[in-house]
Amino acid sequence: MTVGYESAIGSHVGMVRSNNQDSGFAGDYLFLVADGMGGHAGGDVASAIAARTMAELDGHPSADARATAQTLRKAVLKTNTKLRDTVVERPELAGMGTTFTGFVTVGDQLSLAHIGDSRLYLFRDNALRQITKDHTFVQRLVDAGKITEEEAKTHPRRSVLMRVLGDVDASPDIDTEVLDTQPGDIWLLCSDGLCGYVEDSDIEKVLRRRRSLQGAVDGLIDKSLAHGAPDNVTVVLVETTEAPVSDPHETSELPEPNRRFAGSAATSPEVRDGEVTTARTRLMGRRRPVRKPPQVEESHFEPRVDEYLAELMAETRRRNRNRRLLWALGALAVLLAVGGAVLFGYQWTQSRYFVGTDGETVIIYRGVQQDIGSLSLYSVAENTEIPLDELDGLEQRQVERTLGAGSLEEAREIVLRLGVHDE
């Protein structure tokens, strides 16, 4: 079977950053995302250099996917050398780096290269699956069984990268892989400005409801904006299609190259007179109400992997011990207070409310989420009859963890705010 590929690309600076440190590229055979780091100037320069350098591979198709994967790996290492040379020429850019996740199409296969925490997903048969693994400290904790995937999303060290391109490592390890594809597959490349703030289930919904690839790109960026978009967000979608069989006796002109850059790489950065200038991608997405952006922490690379892992694992153990101690002391204080004034304490709890769920619908409860022996300190105040699965992924998690309120009216206002943004 002969396959073809269609693609769409977009990038947005987000609601917090002053410049776009992401870069993306969608060509005829090569597709990539690079997420830069290293301060106001260094990050956008690093990602743009990576995207522009790697784009030179586009337009050189190969018939061997495994050989192409090795060619891609060598090109990524060459890009790393170019970044290091740039820092030698411009010392003010010291510490800059970038992730890289990209692939080259080879017939009905993809040759993938990956380093950092940008991601590749596969959307097949209406289901989304993550293909790449993040090269982050928290991912190592997850792999070691120290924390769960859910805990990794809010871990204070989630921005620490263990592998990255830049002047920090002369020969970084690059993951390579050959992947099979078939008509109907959609491959999603994205920076962590999307996957770090939008749940996989919500990404899946946008792809299911797409009317076009570019519409899906815009929809995914809009989802990030709806969650406050504290980081730059870049999205590349590539759909595998069934190509028409051509007549071997028919001659036709070669199609025009289809090369599109996004983000910092939309115009090549220039380093001159001690300053770095880059062009910004046109802001994409509709005007819409957004949530307050969460505080964003700059990604950074930690080269002393073993020492850093040992130090942070010790810190994690200390934090867990302190958390358990605080919880035990808090529980003891509650029990003593209730034992000393049961009636007074119960009356106070009945002046509180929280929004939670019974597993299927959103419920307003009166009281506090606490049991003392067989005595429950909360009861149903109102059943909103709002199905839990109608909320997006982040809101479902918030409701499952409960949202406190000082009065019934405040709890009702919280319910009204759920789901105010469009799909």
Image: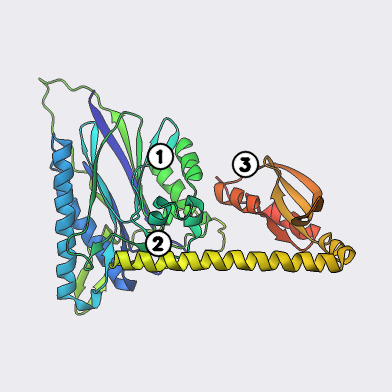
**Tag 3, which secondary structure?**
helix
Hey, what amino acid is under mark 3?
Answer: Glu
Residue 196 is situated, as x and y percent measured from the top left of the image, at: 44, 55
- Real-space Cα separation, disc 2 to disc 1, in angstroms: 26 Å
Q: Is residue 50 left or right of residue 374?
A: left
- Of the residues tagged 2 and 3, which is closer to the observer? 3
Q: Residue at x 74, y 47 (%)?
A: 363
Sooner in the amino-acid sequence: mark 2 or mark 1: 2
Q: Secondary structure at mark 2?
A: loop
Instruction: Give the residue number, with chain letter if any, for mark 1.
Output: 129
Q: Which residue is mark 3?
A: 390
Query: Is residue 64 visible from the viewing direction of this image?
Result: yes
Of marks 2 and 3, which one's residue comes earlier in the chain? 2
Nearer to us of marks 2 and 1 is 1
Instruction: Residue under label 2, please give it.
Output: 13
| Res 8 label | none
x and y percent of residue 368 in the render? 76, 58
Give the crowd class for mark 1: few <14, some 14-19, many >=20 residues within 10 Å: some
Q: In the rendered structure, are the residues bearing label 1 and label 3 in contact, judged by CB atoms less than 8 Å apart?
A: no
From the viewer's side, name the closer residue of 143 and 53: 143
Q: Are the residues flagged by discs 2 and 3 in contact, CB closer than 8 Å?
A: no
Determine the CA span between mark 1 and mark 3: 22 Å
Q: Residue at x 70, y 50 (%)?
A: 356
Mark sitting earlier along the chain (1/3): 1
Question: 299 or 216: nearer the eye?
Answer: 299
